[in-house]
Amino acid sequence: MDTKELAEMVGSSRDSVCYWIKKTLPEVKMGKGVVVDLTEAQALAIVKAMPKKNIITRERQNAVPGTQSAVFPHDQFQAIVESAVRGAIAAIRGDILPAPATEKIEAPKMTPRAELNRIVRAYADQAEIEFKEAWGLLYNEALYRLETNLPARAKHAGKPPLDIADELGLIPQLVAIAREVFA
C-alpha cells in the first residue's frame, strides 16, 4: 500500500500521512517522487500513531455543511480502518479474503397506520389535490363500505378520525379500501 492509498483510506491528506511515516517509521526512506510501499504492519502503525482529530470519515468529508455527519468512537474507527487497511493490502497482493460474518439486520415493518398515511398522501400528490381532500375521499368510502362516519365520531369525541378508526380496529380495512380506491 502506498501513501496515496493510505491517505484515501483514512481520509487524511497525503502530506499528513508522509509526516507520520517519517515520525513513526524513520527507517522508511522518503523522498520527492519516491513511491513508498508499506507493509500491513507499517500501515497499521502509522494509522495508530496519527491523531484521530485529523482523521475524518468519508461520510463526514462529503457531508453537506449544517448537517450531522457520521463520527465514530475511537475504538470503532480504529477497527474500521484496520479492517480496511488489511483488505486493501490483501486486494493489492491478490489474496482472497473470507467474507466478513455480518449479522443480517431486518428493516422494521411499516405499521398499517403509516402505510395508510403513505397511500393517501401519494394519491393526493399524484392527483394534485390537497391532503385534506384525499382523506375526505377515504372517509367517504369508509362511510359507505364500513357504515362508519369517522369524521362525525371524531368531532364528537374531540379526536382525529384516524384515532377513532384505530380504536375501532378499522385501520386494516381502511388500508384495503385505500389500496383499491387510490390504486
Image (cartoon, grey):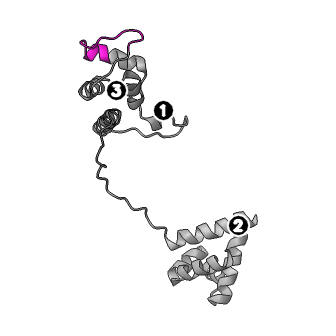
Q: Which image quarter is the N terminus in?
A: top left
Label ID, residue 22: none
Tell which circle, 2 or 1, labels the residue nearer the N-terminal end.
1
Q: Which residue is mark 3?
A: 1
Q: Is residue 155 visible?
A: no
Compared to 32, does 181 lie above or below?
below
Q: Measured along the vertical axis of the image, is residue 116 above or below residue 62? A: below
Label 2 sits on residue? 124
Element on which disc 2 rests = helix
Label 1 amino acid?
Gln
Marks 1 and 3 close (CB-CB < 8 Å): no
Instruction: Work out whether 96 lies above or below 5.
Output: below
N-terminal of the pair, mark 1 or mark 3, is: 3
Along the line of sight, which residue is nearer the eye, 129 or 181? 181
Q: Give the magenta range.
A: 21-34
Instruction: Name the residue that disc number 1 marks.
Output: 61
The label nearer to you, 2 versus 1, is 1
Number of residues whose C-alpha sits closer than 10 Å to that of mark 3, classed few (under 14), some (14–19) or many (20 or more) = many
Q: Is residue 23 magenta?
A: yes
Residue in the picture at 30% in, 43% down = 96
Q: Residue at x 61, y 78 (%)?
A: 154
144 up-or-down from 94: above or below: below
Determine the CA span between mark 2 and mark 3. Answer: 55 Å
Q: Is residue 45 visible?
A: yes
Q: Position of residue 139 (x, y in %)?
A: 66, 79
**Which of the two labelled residues, at mark 2 and mark 3, occupies the earlier sequence position?**
3
Q: Which residue is found at the position 66% from the left and 65% from the top?
A: 122
